[in-house]
Amino acid sequence: MGGEGFELEEERDGPLELLQSLRSKATELLLREEWEESILVYTQFIDLSRIQISNAGESDPDPDSIAKLRRSLCLSLCNRAEARARLRHYLEAMKDCDQALEIEKTHFKTLLCKGKVLLGLSKYSSALECFKTALLDPQASDNLETVTVYMEKCKKLEFQAKTGAFDLSDWILSGFRGRCPELAEFIGSIEIKKSDLSGRGLFATKNIVAGTLILVTKAVAIERGILGNGDSGEKAQLIMWKNFVEEVTESVRRCDRTRRVVSALSTGKDEDSLEIPEISLFRPEEAFETCGGDLKHNLDSEKLLSILDVNSLVEDAVSAKVMGKNKEYYGVGLWTLASFINHSCLPNARRLHVGDYAIVHASKDIKAGEEISFAYFDVLSPLEKRKEMAESWGFCCGCSRCKIESLLYVTNQEIREIEMGVERGVDAGNAVYMMEEGMKRWKVKGKDKGLLRASYWRVYDEIYNSERLMKRWGRKIPTMEVVVDSVSDVIGSEERLMKMAVEGMMKKNGGSSNIVEMEKILKLGKGVYSKVVSKKKAMKTLIGLK
Ligand SMILES: C[S@@+](CC[C@H](N)C(=O)[O-])C[C@H]1O[C@@H](n2cnc3c(N)ncnc32)[C@H](O)[C@@H]1O
């Protein structure tokens, strides 16, 4: 940035003086990081200098001054791109870079900026090509380190995007110090298909082992804040929602691809007639993108609100974990590919939130062809409670667990009585005993035992955590390990199951660990936190073990 235009001021009359002062002002704003304002002033400069260049073609025979003006135009387009990139208006930034490169094919600063913009768009291999071209410019020798760092970043992210090989261990071990690690977007062995639950769903195309990453996706928009209690908390939540809606609206307006993926999402109505999008629509390297400002098909705001109502995710949800962020934070966002994941009371996936990324992973082994699902609400709850929660989400759950349990409840008076007892707060030991004895009489076998234990988790949890209750009932009911195994077998790894297993191990071994039990707990940990925590030490830190 700097003084090319100053000579013009001395030589030229009105318009060139104006150009000069516009450029100085824009540069000053850029240096002060006042991005929006600097874009406005650069736009004035760019429009005016284009007029000057086309007029000069007719009236000004001095080729030198035109060349200078064209160089200024190139630099201003590049600077406007930089400001737009800072605001994450990547497509407009890209347009500016391309126009600047039409003027100077190897303009170093523009190539650097374009590379960063491509990185922002998760187009890692194109970004790498751009940085490689920048290296050919003589100016690159003064900026070798910067370009090399970017090139390494592209290679790392491209590798992650291709393989799903992410590792957050060191960041976890450092106590989440510094900025959260940069992640690539990744799409594993999955496809979008018609779901038996409702509308479309995400399906595994290969067998997936527990802990394996299924997808990593960047939010279209995300809004975070600290909520207070009571009225002020509610008010803060409303303001955050309003800001979030505005952010999504802006992203949709700015990018045709975002508009297409967002408008493919469900509004909660007539899901079975919705189109099934190709998974390639979600692959940044393959996607075709255009600036959306002048496109006719806008998403109407009523539809957008319904889409956000159905598809936005809260970071700190029951089947999610936020990493490296203050617990007080409340974050709501839209992650388009994750929006195709249906709920199941027998979920097989969970998610982690790292920065603006959602990482979805298998919380138990998933077979090829199986639907991928996570829990929208607490599935360690009885059927009636789950029905209420699904209703508040606007649907009636069609998962196999709800079907099995509904049938059992219709035909079985005893189970309804136990449930009423639990509701009234009867002795937890008695309720667990009745349930376990009942399951023998009702011939509930194998995995179905895990379903009912998951539904009455509250009383199982109470009894295994109470020395008094265990003294009285301990010998009459299954061990905690048997219950944890059978429940995790059906609902996958879950934090509360993991915590119970840890406490059980500690109690049994007088505060220390046992190798066999530890391996089991680490396996549960992998289902809760995924393989992005590859180092045992980091996993133990998260689990709360030394
Ligand atoms: C985030 S969307 C999931 C994808 C959606 N099925 C689609 O076709 O786009 C959430 C909506 O899916 C439907 N859904 C999700 N899980 C369901 C379930 N277990 N049973 C019935 N409907 C479900 C509900 O209509 C819900 O509002």
Image (cartoon, rainbow, N blue to C red):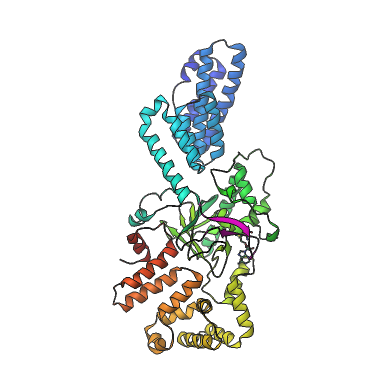
Residue 46 position in % (x across, y down):
56, 26
Does residue 473 show up magenta in the picture? no
Magenta segment range? 187-209
**71 is higher (above) or lower (below) than 410:** above
* Viewer-proximal residue among 234 and 224: 224
Residue 167 position in % (x across, y down):
39, 53
Quadrant of the image occupied by residue 250:
top right
Residue 118 position in % (x across, y down):
50, 39
**260 is higher (above) or lower (below) than 495:** above
Residue positioned 56% across, 51% down in the render: 243
Does residue 194 show up magenta in the picture? yes
Asked if residue 33 can be seen in this view, the reply is no
Residue positioned 55% across, 15% down in the render: 13
Residue 88 position in % (x across, y down):
52, 42
**486 is higher (above) or lower (below) than 326:** below
Count of marks placed on residues:
0
Asked if residue 442 can be seen in this view, the reply is yes
In the rendered view, does 364 fall on the left or right side of 255? left
Of the 4 image quadrants, the one containing the N terminus is top left
Which quadrant of the picture is home to ligand 1? bottom right
Residue lying at the far top in this picture: please name it.
Answer: 61
